[in-house]
Amino acid sequence: MAQAGIEQTETMTVREAIRQALREELDRDDDVYMMGEDIGDMGGVLAVTGDLIDEFGEERVRDTPISEAGFVGAATGAAATGTRPVVEIMFSDFMGVSMEQTMNQMAKMRYMFGGKTEMPVTIRTTEGGGMGAASQHSGTVHAWIAHFPGLKAVSPGTAESAKGLTKAAIRSDDPVFVFENKMIYERQGEVPTDPEFTVPIGEAAVEREGSDVTVLATQRLVGDSLDVAEDLAGGTSVEVIDARSLYPLDTDTIVESVEKTGRLVVADESPLSYGIHAEVATRAMENAFFSLDAPIQRVGTPDTHIPFSPTLEDEVLPDGDDVREAIGRIT
Amino acid sequence: MSDYTLDSAEGRVEALRRMLTIRSFDETAGERFADGEIPGFVHLYVGEEAVGVGTCAALNDDDYIASTHRGHGHCIAKGLNPKYMMAELYGKADGYCNGKGGSMHIADVDAGMLGANGIVGAGPPMATGAALSIDYQGRDQVAVGFLGDGAVAQGQVHEAVNLASTWNLPAIFVIENNRYGEGTPVEQQHNVDNLSDTAAAHGIPGVTVDGMDVTAVAEAVEEARKRARAGDGPTMIEAETYRYRGHYEGDEQVYRDEDEVERWREQDPIASFKERLIDRGELTEAVFEEMQAEAQATIENALAYAKEADDPHPSEAYEDMFGDSVPEIERFAQQATARTDGGDH
């Protein structure tokens, strides 16, 4: 759903939308540069940065050693001293290597220093199963970051939000993690072409209005839930919200929807325990308890790692069928 | 230029004054901690003053340093005000970090001090990052990452040095080898003759200098700074030094005997530098005693200031998480403000 006042759009994939966001922000601000593994001449392992190195050169599209602690740490130091690095971590599973620099330095410096530094660093990374990449290249770990104080986390589900959130992340003076689901890079959507278009961090988007049940979804499950909503139209009226921002989380939009529908399904690819689902459910319970007509339902990965064999991977990965079943249980 | 360099008599006396101020600050902090006035942990720099002061004497004022958990000496060497440092140790509102950091996190980014750091080995990546900003924007600065001998075993240190070397960044890594990584001797933690030998793995020069000699440290850092500014990349400097106090205040120091401490005290960086300045006719015993008294007075004033200063308002716990406020935290801030309405803040 386009933002008010933005008329011109173009159809493009999520991948193209992110690349356009990067291009526009590199154009807009000389202090912005990118760093990561194979993002230069190789164009990124999943081809997101593409040919940006040809436009901006190797000073601004920097290939790093395979050294997440080194370059995430350096990006933190750089962001504290006047530049605005945009880091790509090839697969989110590799974030463990740089967790010290993330949790003890990047997340804490502004606070520990009494507000005397800014931390304008963006971390882009890919998440999710579905391509047979096995357990160390398929995880969905955004709950770690959403949980950890001092970091912001966004998780686009559409091409429009992918562009707008990436741009907002780069313009932010806070550390923002952009979690890109690797299975939706080819998904197409209408994307505003105005270079000033951004999606404010902390605002969810109602992607489809409905009156019987709310599905609060993230990433790949936004599109899957929209497909389910379309299938069920005429029988069950499903409202689909793309959370877009995990931290901060747009409680108001979720609560407003639940007050209308009385039913909530939370669909997120993270492991089910102690995560995004629990947080959304708690906020709905805290703020809309008396509007709820049925137990809140969770759709996620059942606390396993993502296995290699396609049969096994299909078994554990949440999809539209799981959303449909969850809706069926409470409508 | 730094406001003190070791190539003039005036600068040398100022370096001595800074070393005296550091010692006085840390001895006082140790006493106040023992008396239970300072919360948390403190790690004192007594004995190591020549490393911080020698390093900062060779830097320009706008160069960056990234410090360690043992950071008070680096702060004073870099020109931070002991008043606001002591206020931070006391958790007061106008400490350098408004009471949110304490001893282990004193920072003044505008003064080029990127923070003391509670994580062993965290300084080098920070320095590499500052050097990246410098290089990217073409500024005439360098960034120094301090680390202890123990940190040389940390992976992130080598990742940071490798990145700085590969990208040819204006960084300098200063290892303060004080013989013990927390409570374990350096020989039990590393299998190299000199910790600076590890520089070879990253294709940069590594030198080992007498860290009890402020001029030896300054000369090495000056050389490294020139190299960095000439575009020749980083240098690793190991300064051999010693801490007279435990790893932290309260450490029983079962890992060493008092004789060893006494032997190192015979090479005391302040006493030896003082003797040298007197021999050169740049200082007299009387002037030295006056300087010592001044340093003590500076710290007593800082202490009095810190004790009198205001505590932070409880609602300040909710500030500075982000550049803008988030609703998740804002509601607690509002509750804290409401709870204390009618107070004097």
Image (cartoon, coloured by chain):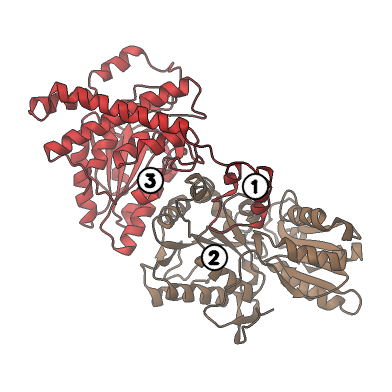
Residue B337, which numbered label?
Answer: 1
Mark 3 residue crowding within 10 angstroms, few (<14) / some (14–19) / many (20+): many
- Indicate the chain on which mark 1 is placed: B
Contact (Cβ within 8 Å) of mark 1 with mark 3? no
- Indicate the chain on which mark 3 is placed: B
Which residue type does callout 1 highlight? Thr
- Near-viewer residue (B61 or A186): B61
- Near-viewer residue (B285 or A73): B285
* SS at circle 2: helix
Q: Could you confirm whether marks 1 and 3 are on the same chain?
A: yes
Residue B178's x, y, as percent? 33, 28
Q: Residue A13 vs residue A286: left or right?
A: left
Hue used for the chain lettered A: brown
* SS at circle 1: helix
Which residue type does callout 2 highlight? Ala
Instruction: Give the residue number, with chain letter if any, for mark 3.
Output: B124
Q: Which chain is red?
A: B
Mark 1 residue crowding within 10 angstroms, few (<14) / some (14–19) / many (20+): some
Q: Is residue A141 above or below residue B237?
A: below
Label 1 vs label 3, nearer the camera: 1
Label 3 vs label 2, nearer the camera: 2
Residue shown at 42% from the left, 66% from the top = A33
Residue A21, which numbered label?
Answer: none
Which residue type does callout 3 highlight? Pro
* SS at circle 3: helix
Contact (Cβ within 8 Å) of mark 3 with mark 2? no
- Near-viewer residue (B98 or A63): B98
Which residue in the rendered view is the most extreme toward the bottom? A8
Q: CA distance from mark 2 to mark 1?
A: 30 Å
Instruction: Give the residue number, with chain letter if any, for mark 2.
Output: A169
